Image: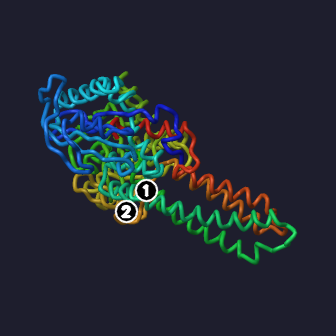
Amino acid sequence: MTPVTSAPTPYRDPIIAIATAPGRGAVGIVRLSGTGLRSFAEWLCGRALTPRTASFGPFNDTQGHAIDHGLALYFPAPQSYTGEDVLELQAHGGPVVLQLLLQRMLQAAGERDPATREPRLSRLRLARPGEFTERAFLNDKMDLAQAEAVMDLIDASTEAAARSATRSLSGEFSRAIDALRDQLIHLRMLIEATLDFPEEELDVLQQHDVRGQLQALRQTLADVRQKARQGSLLREGIQVVIAGQPNVGKSSLLNALAGAELAIVTPIAGTTRDVVRQTIQIEGVPLHVLDTAGLRAARDEVERIGVARAWAHIEHADALIWVRDLTRMDDADYAAGDADIGCSLKDKLPAGVPLVSLWNKRDAAPGATIPAGGLAFSARSGEGLDALRQRLLDLAGWQGGTGEGVFIARARHVQALSETGDRLDAASVLVDAAQPALDLLAEELRLAQHALGAITGEFTSDDLLGEIFSRFCIGK
């Protein structure tokens, strides 16, 4: 990774931002990071600052009047979050107070030192989103996977997701990637050494059991990929669309899943006109559930728009719950309408979208036979709700449990691991060939290492870094 000292000038500029969330709070923090901040920090606070020790006192304006009283914390490089000198002012969390502190620090940076006639802190500017964490990455305080885990921890919507993000932030995911990388490097060393010294005519594949080492590497990768897929589920969740004809109990199902009266439920067909969204969690896995308008020939323009939106969401669903009325399964008109919609549904669904056929109103038809593969459900009594939840987890690919041992992962991590797997599969084919091409084998292993390195930032483009850190909040 590139150290800040050799980075472009903007990365050497001191930066400042309010580090706490917008709005009112008990405590608010203004954070400053740069090089050589100690003299400026002590002049600004009007007192000596002991590193990593809270110092209470006033924060004064240009006239010497106190803006607020609070704590000043100074962290000298490299023992700080960013790896640079860091000053944090902790004041009362009113937005006006924090803005006054921010303005005072920016103003103070431009004031000239009477002894040198130079600005006390030149080039101080407001931080970009994620720039404090970006500097931590550039200064080798954390790798890219850990940096991403910072925001994943902040954004975690479930306890399981938060715990998994903490494991990634502590380096568990990175250590697994590094272990894979070390095994790859060892294999590359064996193969490339043979290419460099062909006169020795060593049968490197047999002598060093390259086939066995490669198989062990692929198995280790499979374990990491499985944990990453689970971590991706905890982070992203899945989008579940509830669809069906009017008045089959779609909104009642949403209310049952959420455990709250979110959607209006009436006997009037077409009550739901627009999409109702709610995120729930099952065993810590977020499910983004969408209740859609009943699918039928629209009676008016508003309903037509609602039905069109329903179809649009169905096309992009990760899983679909197709709700049917068990009490009307023998009704010819209802069955005909359901069959017509089902035919259209099959045509519109992307290939591979999992489908749950749910027969509602079991309480009103206790003796009815459920078609094969379907689930019986009663929105009134809750019968079948647990079975539906488990079916959704199975469709999502959740392995069960509390997520212990799983590390949070992003789509790009899963993709990089998949590419690594493809390269190792290709390498395995080369090893098993009658006359292995060692130069091609070495290249596949190199590309596999490159894919792994993209996860931790060993091989990362500036464009990707910009994309990742731009999604962070300002001040982090």
The answer to whether residue 472 of the structure is visible from this angle is no
Q: Residue furthest bottom?
A: 207
In this rendering, is residue 130 above or below 226?
above
Find residue 315 and name its label.
none
Q: Mark 1 or mark 2, which has the lower sequence index?
A: 1
Q: Residue furthest right?
A: 199
Q: Amino acid at mark 1?
A: Gly
Q: Nearer the viewer, residue 37 or 186?
A: 37
Q: Nearer the viewer, residue 461 or 99?
A: 99
The residue pinned by badge 1 equals 231
Instruction: From the top left corner, tell me how far across and down residue 435 is, in percent.
Output: 84, 67
Residue at x-position 43% and y-position 47%: 148
The answer to whether the residues at label 1 and label 2 have Cβ atoms under 8 Å apart is yes
The residue pinned by badge 2 equals 403
SS assignment at label 2: loop
Q: Amino acid at mark 2?
A: Gly
